[in-house]
Image: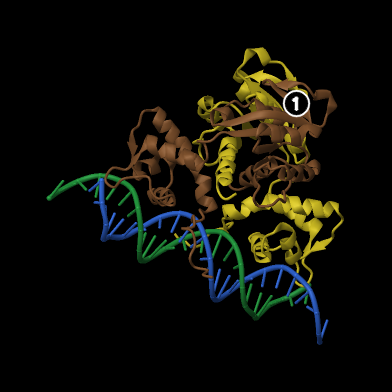
Chain colours: A yellow, B brown, C green, D blue
DNA sequence: TAGATTGTTAATCGATTAACAATC
DNA sequence: TAGATTGTTAATCGATTAACAATC
């Protein structure tokens, strides 16, 4: 009837801004630990080597967390950015591919402290099934769907060869996984309700190599 | 005497463009393996889900690799992008921090095939010194400088806690390391002749978590 | 030569920086 | 109230897309 009248529609935040949130979060965690109570965009900009303008613009995408004449309360800002990043909720993860990388990620306790709980490991190789990593059992791929449903898993970490990644990612999407942390070196193609975050390690190494070619 | 007259000055390529090169490289590798001989920017754009315009602009940053009326020769383009990324040279790496992640990276044979040769592992923990990973010995930190100098190492992979990372990165810069692949969750501060490529895994996981909060 | 497709210029879009009025 | 510093608008800069002439 009327195309204009809508819900107050959450304005889309740009990738650039979102990409900077974890770094803000990290610096604020440090300031908080040091007992710093308030900080101005100017001070933070010097610490982080970005412009104060960018900091204020970034925060204002979310409505503004500061107070004129005062600046930002470190603990409050830390908390708000944490909430934006979803760190106020816990996530339940499985790791698919219990090779070196998969096991390394499963062993990395720091994720737990942020609410990312690793609940299961999966692999196709019979010889490692049943083995435990930090108390987490390695299970066969046949149990994937049952385990996800029974354990309220919302994120899957993919550390399998790219040849298997597409098929497995489809299975994950089909059984309701909402996020995939993809270490497989391939672009997944899934309905956009399933969020994919890629970590292409070899791409990163190539960028380093590129940079090293330039200037002395 | 004259500020204007200079070497033809390699024009600075934007971060955005460089960030896309590894992905181009990956798709071209695949096309090459499939025996595809030529491809137009239009075809490649459909495959990669980007605009043909962007592809042509990107390649033209480096002088243009195509031919009017024909398109791009896959094998040639693959080779040229590989050269841009420095994959025509071999790199000699050490991994500092032989924990799970460090060992996982050392074990990852795919890097070797691109010319990234892992030559040594270092750790502070006495109990794992001398142990071998894929034939590579774990050495004590005291031997760092000697090993780097004696083995022509140009890249160091940092997989140590952030508390040690700053000090170690300084040592690396001092003994002539030209590139650091940094997995430590801290911003390094080094002379700009030392190139740093960060892989902040927890930042990546937070971005996934952010995305999952929005829409269904 | 005609058709195809690049290389490249121009137009648009988005992100960053600067400036300043609002306000604590 | 005066000073400080945000929130926000305007200006600038850079990246992407569109258009098309050059040319294989």
In the rendered image, the vertical position of residue A52 relative to residue A154, given as above or below = below
Quadrant of the rendered structure where residue A144 is? top right
Q: Quadrant of the C terminus of chain B?
A: top right
Identity of the residue furthest to the front in this view? B1
Residue A119 at x, y percent in the picture: 72, 28
Q: Quadrant of the N terminus of chain B?
A: bottom right
Name the residue located 38 percent from the left edge and 41 percent from the top edge: B44
Camera-nearest residue between B78 and B120: B120
**In the image, A179: left or right of D23?**
right
Name the residue located 43 percent from the left edge and 46 percent from the top edge: B50
Residue A121 at x, y percent in the picture: 68, 24
Q: Chain of mark 1?
A: B
Quadrant of the rendered structure where residue B112 is? top right
In the rendered image, the vertical position of residue A56 relative to residue A168, given as above or below = below
**In the image, D20: left or right of B141?**
left
Residue A25 at x, y percent in the picture: 73, 51
Total marks in image: 1
**In the image, A124: left or right of B87?**
right
């Amino acid at each position: 009837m009327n195309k204009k009248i809508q819900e107050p529609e959450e304005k889309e935040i740009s990738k650039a801004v979102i990409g900077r949130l974890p770094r803000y979060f990290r610096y604020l965690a440090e300031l908080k630990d040091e007992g710093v109570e308030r900080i101005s965009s100017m001070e933070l900009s010097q610490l982080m080597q970005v412009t104060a303008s960018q900091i204020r613009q970034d925060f204002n995408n979310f409505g503004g967390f500061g107070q004129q004449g005062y600046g930002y309360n470190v603990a409050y800002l830390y908390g708000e950015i944490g909430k934006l990043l979803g760190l106020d909720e816990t996530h339940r993860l499985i790791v698919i591919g219990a090779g070196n990388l998969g096991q390394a990620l499963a062993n990395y306790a720091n994720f737990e402290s942020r609410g990312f709980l690793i609940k299961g490991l999966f692999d196709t190789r019979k010889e490692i099934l049943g083995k435990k990593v930090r108390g987490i059992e390695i299970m066969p791929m046949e149990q994937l769907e049952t385990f996800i449903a029974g354990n309220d898993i919302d994120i899957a970490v993919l550390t399998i060869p790219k040849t298997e990644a597409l098929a497995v990612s489809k299975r994950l999407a089909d059984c309701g996984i909402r996020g995939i942390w993809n270490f497989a070196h391939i672009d997944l193609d899934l309905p956009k309700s399933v969020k994919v975050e890629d970590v292409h390690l070899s791409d990163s190494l190539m960028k380093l190599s590129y940079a090293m070619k330039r200037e002395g």
